[in-house]
Image (spheres, rainbow, N blue to C red):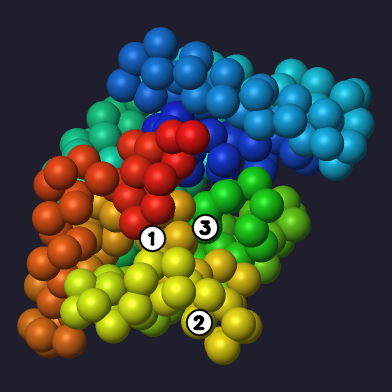
């Protein structure tokens, strides 16, 4: 089965690796240009090599995964069975991409979006085929959950196909009716936003807040470290979607989250967020 991944960043490369871990899938990883796609493939290769060095994977298995992934351009997705979009979390960018993909891809090609919070129905407006949400979680190659989101115009057949593909690559899918933030982020991101508020109010320091949630609520990672992992800009974008879609002020992004994003302190990917990653 030929899989196209549009977007070779952190999520796109992780999704590509998740598919390529299974022998029946051949993956084309693309981005706005070939250089970005090559960087995405290099990211996967480096990640696999670390797994080999740590004894978590055999060298032959790592080579098999990379052999099933090729870097390319959007034009090379013309004969894919499924294209998963994993570009910037911006409605206009996603709609423009799918409009291009519709002119490139064969009629057989299933379209899916990895959006973490945006309306599947709106992204799919103007398309002559179904669009289904296929929301992976970071790191996509290892976390099991996939939210399969049905927009207002998503057929039951397409939703079921995406669900079965998720199962086939070893994921656990849950079917979600479109709603702002879906299931996980509607619960998770407001919790992170509240942790930001606790920090801003001087109730406790970042490390102590995270320790409290790890030892007091049995969370595997604290909310502020998780925000750094997700990206503060992504957390802000999801809170803004929740706020605008529901009109409920309980989803208002905390000003500190907004200020840190403006300052470029977005977490691990920038080297600094609530914690420092440069050392």
Q: Position of residue 11 (x, y in %)?
A: 47, 43
The CA distance from mark 3 to mark 2 is 24 Å
Question: Of helix, strand and loop, which one carries label 2?
Answer: helix
The CA distance from mark 1 to mark 2 is 16 Å
Residue 227 got which mark? 1
Q: Residue at x 40, y 11 (%)?
A: 35
- Nearer to the camera, 28 or 13: 13
How many other residues sit within 10 Å of disc 1, few (<14), some (14-19) or many (≥20)?
A: many
Residue at image mark 3: 137
Residue at image mark 2: 212
The CA distance from mark 1 to mark 3 is 13 Å
Q: Position of residue 235 (x, y in %)?
A: 29, 61
Quadrant of the image occupied by residue 171: bottom right
Q: Is residue 161 left or right of residue 156?
A: right
**Residue 13 appears anywhere in the view:** yes
- Nearer to the camera, 200 or 147: 200
How many other residues sit within 10 Å of disc 2, few (<14), some (14-19) or many (≥20)?
A: some
């Amino acid at each position: 089965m030929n899989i196209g991944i549009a977007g070779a960043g952190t999520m796109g490369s992780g999704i590509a690796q998740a598919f390529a871990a299974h022998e029946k899938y051949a993956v084309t990883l693309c981005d706005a240009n070939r250089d970005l796609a090559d960087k995405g493939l290099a990211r996967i290769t480096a990640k696999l090599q670390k797994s080999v060095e740590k004894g978590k994977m055999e060298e032959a298995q790592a080579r098999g995964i990379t052999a099933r992934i090729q870097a390319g351009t959007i034009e090379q997705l013309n004969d894919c069975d499924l294209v998963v979009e994993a570009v910037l979390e911006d409605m206009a960018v996603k709609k423009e991409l799918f409009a291009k993909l519709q002119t490139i891809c064969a009629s057989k090609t299933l379209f899916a979006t990895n959006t973490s919070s945006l309306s599947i129905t709106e992204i799919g407006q103007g398309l002559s085929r179904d669009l289904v949400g296929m929301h992976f979680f970071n790191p996509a190659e290892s976390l099991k959950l996939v939210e399969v989101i049905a927009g207002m115009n998503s057929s039951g057949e397409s939703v079921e196909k995406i669900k079965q593909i998720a199962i086939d690559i070893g994921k656990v899918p849950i079917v979600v009716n479109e709603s702002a933030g879906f299931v996980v982020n509607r619960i998770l991101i407001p919790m992170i936003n509240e942790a930001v508020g606790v920090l801003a109010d001087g109730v406790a320091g970042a490390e102590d807040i995270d320790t409290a949630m790890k030892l007091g609520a049995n969370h595997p990672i604290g909310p502020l470290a998780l925000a750094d992992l997700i990206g503060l800009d992504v957390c802000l974008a999801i809170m803004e979607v929740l706020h605008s879609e529901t009109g409920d002020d309980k989803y208002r992004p905390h000003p500190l989250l907004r200020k840190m994003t403006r300052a470029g302190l977005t977490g691990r990917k920038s080297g600094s967020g609530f914690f420092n990653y440069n050392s």
